Amino acid sequence: MSAATTRSRTPDRLCAEAVDIARAAAEEAAAPGAVGEHVSLVSEGDRVVTHFFECLESGYRGWRWAVTIARASRAKNITLDEAVLLPGPDALLAPEWVPWSERLRPGDMGPGDLLPTEAEDLRLEPGYTGEDMPPPNSVIAEVMPSDDLAERVEAEDAELTDRGPWTDATAANGRGAIAALAEELGMRRARVLSRYGLHIAADRWDESYGAKTPMAQAAPANCVSCGFLVPMAGSLRQAFGVCANEFSPADGHVVSLSYGCGGHSEAAVMPKPPTPPPPVFDSMGVDEFPLRPARDGGSVEPEPDGESEDLGHS
């Protein structure tokens, strides 16, 4: 038996010697062959001792089978209390539980998945709805009876659809006019992107497709001068755009204007093939051809007009 490890008192002798009883209890609770050597024992109190046995399960490295036995006062019989599997000092433990909102990473969502956002999400702020209270479709709206909600929606629809042509009286109705304009511009949403949400999105995009990336460092020019850059709307157009080059690694992604790659439209412009000059035809001059070669091997002057030579005489 290994040396005893005590807490506050000396372990009971009979309980400390009952290693076989503790082993039998551990083997009954564990799978066959999962209980190893006796490791140590601990005194839990008066006549209460816990025996520890090595766990041989492959998935529980460093864990121990703990069997607690006790003995009544002035009794010689040993009583079994419990047998459990506990982690040891060097046990392999599962990582600390982390909420799903902190475990979620980009790309984890799949078809049919829903990602709820908190009512106090710092990335969002209330959008313009034409009144101080949030709209009925907002997640931060107060819970109200369905009848009141339906009446409220109908009243807002009637206010926006039943108004006549634009007049001074319509302009005086500030809420209806501004709400209609906001809806036309796509601004009448329950929540919109806050300044904080805009900044963290810009930092995230710049980290992926910004000037500090290896691709941008080796690029011949920046995206700001590339013909494949599609400008963005709003304040983001001052620093970002969308790449439309199918051969670029950033195709379809939001890129910083200081980003760049080898697919820049002006990086290596292919020269046009040389165009041959047009042929020249001289239609004004007359080409003279001799009828026979010269006798001395030189050139032959053409015969004068109106004269002919008898070819039958020498």
Image: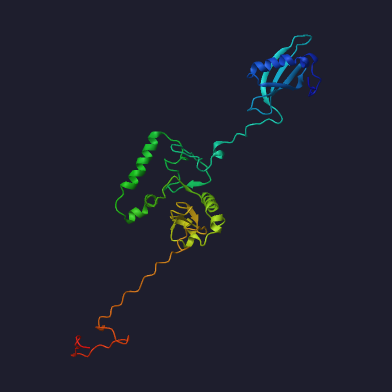
Measuring from the top left, give residue 19's x and y in whole percent.
74, 16
- On the image, which quarter does residue 15 sit in? top right
Measuring from the top left, give residue 236's x and y in whole percent.
48, 56
Is residue 160 rendered to the left or right of residue 46? Answer: left
Name the residue rendered at 74%, 11% in the picture: 78
Please tell me whether residue 230 is drawn above or below residue 290 in the rendered image. above
Q: How many marks?
A: 0
Please tell me whether residue 76 is drawn above or below residue 244 in the rendered image. above
- On the image, which quarter does residue 104 sit in? top right
Name the residue rendered at 30%, 77% in the picture: 280
Query: Which residue is at the front of the view, 64 or 303?
Result: 303
Please tell me whether residue 286 is drawn above or below residue 198 in the rendered image. below
Farthest residue toward the front?
314
Farthest residue toward the left?
306
Of the 4 image quadrants, the one containing the N terminus is top right
Measuring from the top left, give residue 274's x and y in whole percent.
39, 69
Of the 4 image quadrants, the one containing the C terminus is bottom left
Name the residue rendered at 73%, 20% in the picture: 51
Query: Which residue is at the front of the view, 202 or 93?
Result: 93
- State the colouring used for the structure image: rainbow
Is residue 13 rendered to the left or right of residue 106? Answer: right
Measuring from the top left, give residue 129's x and y in whole percent.
42, 47
